[in-house]
């Protein structure tokens, strides 16, 4: 059981910029008359703002909310990485957290050595690791490479091994941040399956995700955080729908930049999105016999080598098609640039589509994406009578009867 | 499942504690982290662990030529190469220990901001490499003593005592530096520089007797003098300066207290600052 009572967490603003104070600054502050000391309160902000939550043993709680809502801060406080500024948390049972896959892996060490290293970082004893060693290796599917340095692993193998170790820690309470975003689809499903097993075995799970389907299928309760506060907490379905409704009211550009996340986030910012030349519309209705223009405006915060931006169309959760802005990844300079995409006329028949923007930096293999940035409602004008009314794609094949 | 286990998370109000029971629980992690550094250290080097022997050996040769032959610095009646190597043995242990320790937290920023464990595990583990180097170099010193036919006396059994004293002073200074480097990165530049100067004010390449009587009290303010001179005497069988050892012990105890206290206090904000 976890009891969170009136927890506040304060951070200094601009933390990312002047992370490392220099001696000179501190010394000069010390020797200056403390005239401007009182004004400094404005430079702080509350990442968590009076959080109260009670999580019963054996429940799975989903944490949702847009970027900067305080989800990750709450996880960090829960997992004792950082202390709250005010308030109290009582945790019954052992807790282990998976905030990032593979933290502490050493590239020079072999898979075997890293299992012991990462396992003990996650709080397992040498004996526990020894006992579960075969299971871990088996689950990750890396038997053949167990004595190879992990720097020679493919990124998929690396992530599988790290997740496999973390999944075998078996704490009473498991805290998982959006780690399922990495890896391929089958791996993500495997992770979700493993987390369901953990939840089914009577453990408590706290799960942060932007993927509402994953949250809906895994969690019994959901807490929606907004600006460091608990906006709503309750049963999964009602909280998710309240959250999604609130998203509809925010402007598309604001939403788009909030939704954009991943490894490239500090290099690239999604500024605005327009569909059919109209900016800021969430849902755009188009006819099936007209082509659709989608334009995204980006701000590159630094020069990025070999970048490709793609538009991906989803129907429910099925990937329908991907369109890239460049045929091969190309470099962009620091500054703004636009990616234009055209969905050809007559391709889509009749569908509700969700637009996703992805950015991929080939040089470092880094990804970022914004899922569900806008909706496209394709309506059939009834002319293509050959297609079935339920078809997503226009009838473009041909058949002959003999 | 240990459901009886209850954790309470609260802001620390003035109380500071190192959570020694937690450190004990994570003792395996300290060992594994130390092993990681040791294993990784000579990966992809052609000479591998031989570097632990080559480095002090070359220093010994250079110092013997410069200070022994050219400057004719006295060495208490022992061949200068043996004399200087026995000094460098403890000095290198101290200086590499402190340097590794002070850089250790900053070098593990990813772990500190993503995983929970007692933070002190990182600086503690970082001294493992220096310990291994010390053992190797101690073996080399015994061989050098045979070569120069300096025979050890019963005092040799005291060597671990002085090595342990050195280790405590490494922790005292290293823990403090590691914590302060998290906030002030200036110390990444200060520490190597400081170590160079410190070596010359410590009787490493010259004997204590080389310092004029009237200034000798100054040297007792240096917390490593007792360990360097003590270990040297223990190896070479020369008379041990117990006064220097006593003052080093007192200073080390103070440093260790200050270091641990500062670390425990600073530890609270590592994840936010690093």
Image: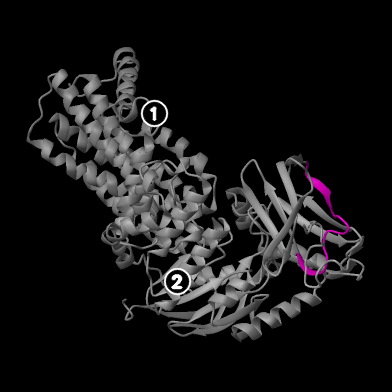
Reply yes or no: does residue A35 show up in magenta: no
Nearest the camera: B3 or B51? B3
Q: Which residue is mark 1?
A: B45
Can residue A30 be seen here? yes
Q: Is residue A44 left or right of residue A93?
A: right
Position above or below: B151 against A298: above
Write the start and end of the magenta stretch as one range: A333-354
Could you tell me which residue is drawn at 41 percent across and 37 percent down?
Answer: B195
Position above or below: B234 against A402: above
Residue B256 percent coordinates (x, y): 33, 54
Reply yes or no: does residue A334 show up in magenta: yes
Q: Is residue B175 left or right of residue A6?
A: left
Residue B248 percent coordinates (x, y): 27, 46
Q: Secondary structure at mark 1?
A: loop
How has the structure been colored for display?
one colour
Q: Chain of mark 2?
A: A
Q: Which residue is mark 2?
A: A174
Q: Is residue A221 left or right of residue A348?
A: left
- Cα separation between marks 2 and 1: 41 Å
Tell me the quadrant of the picture where the N terminus of chain A can be found.
bottom left
- How many discs appear? 2
Nearest the camera: A202 or B54? A202
Residue A236 percent coordinates (x, y): 60, 82
Q: Chain of mark 1?
A: B
Can residue A79 be seen here? no
The local crowd at label 2, few if under 14, some if 14 to 19, many if 20 or more residues have their Cα within 10 Å, is many
Could you tell me which residue is drawn at 83 percent across and 60 percent down?
Answer: A272
Nearest the camera: A68 or A147? A147
Extreme-front residue of the structure: A402
Could you tell me which residue is drawn at 27 percent across and 36 percent down?
Answer: B134
């Amino acid at each position: 059981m976890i009891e969170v009572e009136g927890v506040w967490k304060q951070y200094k603003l601009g933390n990312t910029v002047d992370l490392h104070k220099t001696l000179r600054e501190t010394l000069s502050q010390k020797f200056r008359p403390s005239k401007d000391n009182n004004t400094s309160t404005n430079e702080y902000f509350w990442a968590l703002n009076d959080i109260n939550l009670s999580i019963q043993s054996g429940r799975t709680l989903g944490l949702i909310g847009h970027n900067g809502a305080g989800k990750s801060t709450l996880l960090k406080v829960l997992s004792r990485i950082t202390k709250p500024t005010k308030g109290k948390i009582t945790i019954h049972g052992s807790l282990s957290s998976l905030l990032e896959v593979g933290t502490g892996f050493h590239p020079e060490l072999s898979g075997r050595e890293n299992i012991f290293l990462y396992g003990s970082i996650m709080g397992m004893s040498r004996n526990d690791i020894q006992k579960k060693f075969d299971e871990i290796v088996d689950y990750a599917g890396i038997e053949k490479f167990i004595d190879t340095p992990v720097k020679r692993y493919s990124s998929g193998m690396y992530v599988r091994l790290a997740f496999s170790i973390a999944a075998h820690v078996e704490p009473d309470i498991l805290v998982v941040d959006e780690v399922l975003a990495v890896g391929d689809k089958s791996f993500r499903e495997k992770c979700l399956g493993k987390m369901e097993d953990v939840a089914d075995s009577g453990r408590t799970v706290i799960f942060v995700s932007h993927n509402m389907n994953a949250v809906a299928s895994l969690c019994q309760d959901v807490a929606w955080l907004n600006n460091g506060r608990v906006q709503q907490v309750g049963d999964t379905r009602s909280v998710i729908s309240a959250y999604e409704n609130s998203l509809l009211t925010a402007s598309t550009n604001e939403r788009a930049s909030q939704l954009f996340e991943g490894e490239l986030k500090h290099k690239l910012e999604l500024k605005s999105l327009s569909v059919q030349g109209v900016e800021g519309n969430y849902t755009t209705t188009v006819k099936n016999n007209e082509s659709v223009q989608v334009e995204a405006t980006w701000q590159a915060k630094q020069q990025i080598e070999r970048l490709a931006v793609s538009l991906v169309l989803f129907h429910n959760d099925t990937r329908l098609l991907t369109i890239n802005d460049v045929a091969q990844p190309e470099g962009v300079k620091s500054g703004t640039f636009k990616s234009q995409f055209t969905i050809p006329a007559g391709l889509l028949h009749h569908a509700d589509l969700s637009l996703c923007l992805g950015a991929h930096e080939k040089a470092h293999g880094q990804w970022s994406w914004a899922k569900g940035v806008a909706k496209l409602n394709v309506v059939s004008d009834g002319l293509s009578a050959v297609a079935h009314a339920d078809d997503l794609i226009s009838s473009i094949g041909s058949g002959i009867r003999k | 499942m240990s459901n009886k286990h209850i954790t309470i998370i609260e802001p620390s109000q003035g109380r500071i504690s190192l959570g020694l029971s937690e450190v004990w629980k994570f003792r395996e992690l300290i060992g594994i982290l130390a092993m990681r550094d040791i294993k990784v250290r000579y990966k992809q080097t052609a000479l591998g662990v031989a570097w632990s022997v080559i480095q002090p050996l070359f220093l010994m040769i250079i110092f013997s030529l410069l200070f022994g032959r050219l400057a004719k610095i006295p060495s208490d009646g022992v061949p200068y190469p043996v004399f200087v190597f026995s000094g460098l043995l403890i000095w290198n242990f101290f200086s590499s220990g402190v340097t590794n320790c002070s850089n250790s937290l900053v070098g593990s920023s990813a772990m500190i901001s993503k995983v929970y464990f007692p933070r002190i595990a990182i600086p503690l583990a970082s001294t493992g490499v220096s310990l291994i180097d010390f053992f190797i170099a101690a073996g080399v010193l015994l061989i050098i003593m045979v070569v120069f036919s300096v025979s050890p006396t019963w005092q040799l059994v005291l060597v671990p005592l002085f090595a342990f004293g050195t280790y405590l002073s490494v922790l005292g200074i290293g823990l403090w530096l590691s914590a302060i480097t998290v906030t002030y990165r200036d110390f990444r530049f200060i520490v190597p520089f400081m170590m160079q100067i410190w070596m010359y004010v410590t009787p490493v390449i010259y004997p204590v007797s080389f310092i004029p009587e009237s200034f000798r009290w100054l040297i007792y303010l240096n917390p490593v003098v007792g360990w360097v001179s003590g270990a040297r005497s223990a190896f070479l069988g020369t008379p041990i300066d117990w006064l220097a050892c006593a003052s080093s012990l007192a200073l080390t105890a103070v440093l260790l207290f200050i270091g641990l206290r500062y670390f425990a206090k600073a530890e609270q904000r590592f994840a936010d600052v690093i």
